[in-house]
Image (spheres, rainbow, N blue to C red):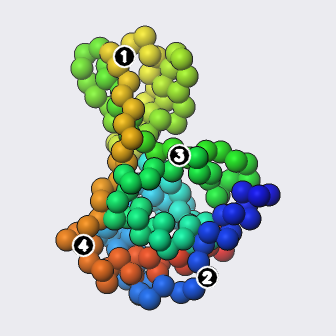
Amino acid sequence: MVAYLVSVSAGTKTPVVGDSAKGEGIFFGKGGCAQCHMVKGRGGRLGPELTRVGAARSVAYLTESIREPDKSLSLGMTDPNNHYVYPLEYETVTAVTREGQRVIGVAKNEDTFSLQLLGQDGNLHLFLKKDLREVLHERRSLMPAYSESVLSREELQSLLAYLTSLRGE
């Protein structure tokens, strides 16, 4: 219950100055956000699901996540879409096979003997650790940084207007 109350209070109810419709176009178009993020069943699975992100995250958090995704990975945060308290972690994991093939993605499950990795290719890769040369965990995000040269201030405001409108309703 506490996690729910925190997630609800984190979102903003104040409208962001920007064009939400243009922001949606950026999300599903130019920004390429939907390649990794899903909204209402549409998009990718590699990054966090964002259907309720406007109710769960502040504008400042969203801005930082877009401009500097490596700055603070979601260590210790919980999934606002789930009734249970599951920690979120989106660090980059690279599995290197004995043959030298590198599969880069996000670990979905890992234990002493195995690794299940959602790869950048969108596929789930299953490995036995005895068959890998190494597993590299990097405290960096797979998400690119959207600097002002990539996403203008106006485009960012529109994207933020769209994201803050996503309240799971």
Q: Secondary structure at mark 2?
A: loop
Q: Quadrant of residue 166?
A: bottom right
Q: Amino acid at mark 1?
A: Leu
Q: Residues within 10 Å of mark 1 (few under 14, many from 20)?
A: some
Q: CA distance from mark 4 to mark 2?
A: 26 Å
Q: Label 3 vs label 4: CA separation?
A: 26 Å
Q: Earlier in the sequence, mark 4 or mark 2?
A: 2
Q: Quadrant of residue 40?
A: bottom right
In the image, is 16 to the left or to the right of 3? left
Label 4: few (<14), some (14–19) or many (≥20) C-alpha neighbours in 10 Å = few
Q: Position of residue 112 (x, y in %)?
A: 54, 17
Would you name the residue on which mark 3 appears?
A: 75
- Above-or-below relation of 75 to 130: below
Sequence-first disc among 3 and 4: 3
Q: Residue at x 45, y 50 (%)?
A: 73
Give coordinates of residue 119: x percent, y percent. Answer: 38, 38
Say whether residue 123 is visible.
no
Alpha carbon separation for disc pair 3 and 2: 25 Å
Residue at 46% of width from left, 45% of height from top? 90
Instruction: State the mark number for residue 11.
Output: none
10 relative to 127, above or below: below
- Single out the mark in the foreground, 3 or 2: 3
Who is closer to the viewer here, 7 or 97? 7
Mark 1 or 4, closer to the camera: 4
Q: Which residue is mark 4?
A: 148
> Which mark is nearer the camera, 1 or 2?
2
